Amino acid sequence: MRITDVQTIIVGNPWKNWMFVRLETDEGIHGIGEGTLNAFAKTVEAAVHELKQRYIGMDPFQIETLVQRMTRDVYSEGGQIHGAAVCAIETACWDIIGKAVNQPVYNLIGGRYHESLRVYANGWYKGDRDPETVAAQAKDVVARGYTAMKFDPFGSSHRIMDPKDRDLSIAIIEAVRDAVGPNVDLFIEGHCRFTVSEALQIAERIAPFKPGWFEEPTHHMNIDAVVEVARNSPVPIATGESFSSTHQFAELFSHNAVHIVQPEPLNLGGLWNCRKVVGMADAFYAQSAPHQAQGPVATAITTHINASSPNTYVAELFDEFNVDWEAELVDHPVKVVDGYMQIPDRPGLGLDLNMDVAARYPYNEKNFLPLFDEGWERRTGASGK
C-alpha cells in the first residue's frame, strides 16, 4: 500500500479553526487525521503540503519511518506547528492501518485496557467572569453526569496578579466547589500564566478547595520552574500539553517531581509519540491525562491512547461544550454516558468527516482563542474583543 494524495480541510469553529486531513492510498483506503493549532490553521495546512515529498509514495504502515522522514530528516525544528502537521499525517496513517486490518487503533498500540474512560468537562465556562455565573454553569455540568471539570478562573493574568483579581479568582473556585459539592473533581487551569512565587501563592489559597490538580502554573519552556512549584505546592501539579518533543518529557521526568502529565498528540507529532510519553510516565509511577482541546478527530485520537494505557487518569472533553453542529461534522462522534467516554470498536479511529458539513463552516482568521485578552472566556474568538 502507498500513500497517493492528501486533502486538507479547515473547519471554522468560532474560537479555533480546526485543521483536518484526508489521506488517500492506492488501495482505495483513506484515513482522517487532525493537525489543529490555535491561530495557526493555515500555517499548519501549508506545512502539511510542504512535507508532501516526505510521505507521498510511502507505506502508511511504516509509522516510525514516516515520522523520522518528516522530523529528523528535514533537520529543522518547527515546534508545535511542525508537530501538528506531522500529527495530521501520522494519525491519518493509523486510521488507514486500522481499516486495512479491520481493527480499532487501540488494538494496535497495546489493546483495550479500559472498558470506558472517566471524563472531565472543559470549555463549559462561557460568559461573565464572576462567581455566580461560573457556579451556575458548573451545576449544569454536574447535571449532565460529569464527575470532574476543569476551568481557568484567572482572567487575562500574566505572571503576577493584583490582589483584587487574585481574590476574584479564588472566589470563583470557592463558588464552584460550593455549587458542585465535595465529590466532584475540580482541575484548575493555569495556562502558563504565572511566576513561581505567584503560582505558589495561588496553590496555597486553592488548597482548601481540594483541586485534583493545578495545571501549567508556569511557562512550559522553563521546566525548572514547574519542578520548583511541584515540589513546594500543597496541591498536585499537572503539565505537558505544550511540549512538542518526547525529550522535554524526559527532562521533566528526570526531576521526579510532576506525576500527572498531559501530552498533546497534535503538538508531539502524533499518536505514537504520545503513547511513548504515556509509557515513560508509567515508568515513573505517573498518571497520564492527555490534553484534548481541539476537534472531534483529536478526541478520537486521545480516546485510543487512553483506552490502551494502564496509567490513564482521566480523559479531557470539549466536544459537548463546543459548537452545536460538531456532532454532525463526523459520522460517529465519541459519546459520553454519565460522565464516562464510550470506547468505539470500529476499525481505525472509528469515525469519518462529513465533507458537506465541513464546507458550511469555512476558515475565518478571527477564529482563535486569545488567552491573554480580557473576556477570552466567552469563547467568541478574536472578534469578541
Image (cartoon, grey):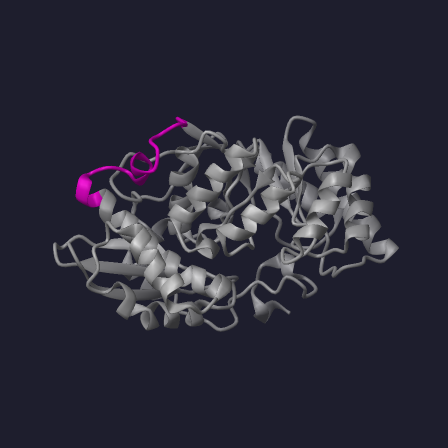
At x 65%, y 54%, the residue is 191
The spot of residue 187 in percent (x, y) is 64, 40
Residue numbers of the magenta segment = 99-115
Taking depth in this image into account, of 100 and 229 the one nearest to the observer is 229
At x 25%, y 53%, the residue is 31
Q: Is residue 173 above or below residue 298?
A: above
The spot of residue 25 in percent (x, y) is 17, 58
**Image quarter hosting the C terminus:** bottom right
At x 32%, y 61%, the residue is 21
**Image quarter hosting the N terminus:** bottom left
> Does residue 109 show up magenta in the picture?
yes
The spot of residue 371 in percent (x, y) is 64, 61
The spot of residue 365 in percent (x, y) is 49, 73
Residue 252 visible in the snapshot? yes
Does residue 356 appear left or right of residue 315 in this picture? left
Residue 296 visible in the snapshot? no
Does residue 22 appear left or right of residue 287 in this picture? left
Q: Is residue 284 above or below residue 48?
A: above
